[in-house]
Image (cartoon, grey):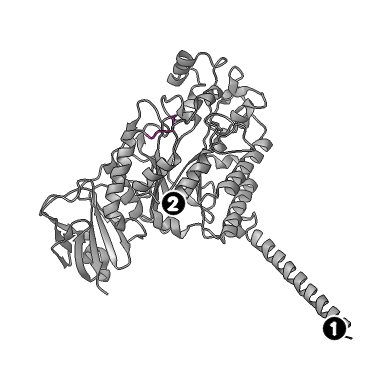
Amino acid sequence: MRYIRITNVISLLLLMACGRNSQQENQEKIQEERYVADWDSLAKYDETAEWFKNAKFGIYAHWGVLSVPAYANDWYPRNMHIEGTNEYKHHVETYGPHSEFGYHDYVPMFKAEEFDASAWAELWEKAGAKFGGIVAIHHDGWSNWDSEINPWNSVDMGPKKDILGSLEKALKERDMKFVTTFHKARSLQIFQQDSTKWLDDTSYFPYNPELPTASEDSLLSIMYGNISKEQFYKNWLGELKEVIDNYSPDLIYFDSKLDKLPDSLKRQFVAYYFNHAEAQGKQVVITHKEGELPKSVSLEDLEKGRMKDKTEEFWLTDETVSVGSWSYTNDLGLKTSDEIIDLLADIVSKNGALMLNVSPKTNGIIPQNQQEILLEIGQWLEINGEAIYGTRTWEVYGEGPTKQEKSGMFLDKLIYTAEDIRYTQKGNNIYAIFLGWPGNNKRVTLQSFSEEVLGENVPQIEAVSVLGGGEVEYNLDEKGLHLTTPANMINEKAFVVKISKGN
């Protein structure tokens, strides 16, 4: 009898153990399949991560083989193949005919011998960035990571370094979120092999039977996108999975031309990324351009642009510190830190974030003049970041004479004045960001605090001060909030007035 009881107990324990294992397996399966490749399923994910809404400012880099020529702009790899362009002439004069020196021959010249991921991460941290990263793969088909799928990668060729891996480690050591950007969709040539479409910009590399871009060599055809659609699609998804599995980016940014890819392929990617994030217990963000992914799973990116007014939806602007090219060139023009700070304030006031691009030299050094701009931004944020990080939009985004006529990408440059003001809020405080210095001891009026603008929502005010400058005199009436600027200039770029509300 005792034997039977013991046996029954053992059987029961085994059954319970099996039950627990089955439950665990089922739970893991449910976890793995929480999101399936269906837009309705994927829409259940919160596409706007809280960390991203709080971060507001990040930095990344256009860097790779496209940096080697250092001529014209980041479309040199394409334009060098189009006869009659300056890039074509420069290439032939400098390197010889394309048949003797093609774009792929730049690869051994990309040595990245001075690349220091820790130095980059430290610079971006000093610049006030809360997230950072790099172009994972540009239109030229070059991968900045250790890829088993793409032979044209930074570990097997060129610098023989895992650029993504070292930068991911350096950024995460500083508690910064990691960004990878993908521009590969434009690389597929299959749609333009008709001779009448050689100059069609739907593909980065123009198909031309006289040039290496038309090569059917098993290696060259991969770089130039001269492969079947089916293989291209397989590689596109496989490379994304490689980066997700090995580097776990917090944000994946896509450049244009995702409309060239099947909808099913995009759904597979989103499901894979979201399920990976769930398994790691983290929030991730996907960005798209021009509606090429649903807004239910991604945020819109406005390249070199922004919204005209504040929006309910959160969004991203990617802008570059340079003028004329995203990648390094020998005559690269630069914006000023003042311009970039004004852009940041305008973007944040309208419910966006800014991702600023830098352009390292082919050896991996970020030029000193670019570094100085970043450090000036960081110095401003050190004092005024309270008005940027973790903020949300206010009743109105701003006021002033300088008007943005439309929303969208590639907007004309605006020059802001001291009368242009942008608003943010956090907790019990409203921040008025003046995009210039009005003058010492100058009486100014914030008209957005008037009854005409706010009606009955005009807040009670307990105190008004300047970040980095102490309290200021003020009074509030039906026409707005009147205050006097400090006796000495706080900052010629922009300065912030902190308005503390009463309970």
Q: CA distance from mark 1 to mark 2?
A: 59 Å
In the picture, residue 501 is in which quadrant? bottom left
Report the side of 155 relative to 441 (left or right).
right
Q: What number is the disc on residue 5?
A: 1
Give me the disc on residue 176.
Answer: 2
Which residue is located at x 58 percent, y 19 percent?
211
Residue at 61 percent across and 41 percent down: it is 239
Query: Which residue occupies the foreground of this view, 35 or 51?
Result: 51
On the image, the x and y values in percent for residue 416 come to 25, 45
Q: How far across and how far down the image is residue 70, in percent? A: 42, 26
| Residue 91: image location, x then y, percent | 47, 18
Is 321 located above or below residue 475 in the figure? above
Q: Tag 1: residue type? A: Arg
Residues shaded magenta: 362-366
Question: Which quarter of the rendering shows the C terminus?
Answer: bottom left
Q: Name the foreground residue: 287 vs 201.
A: 287
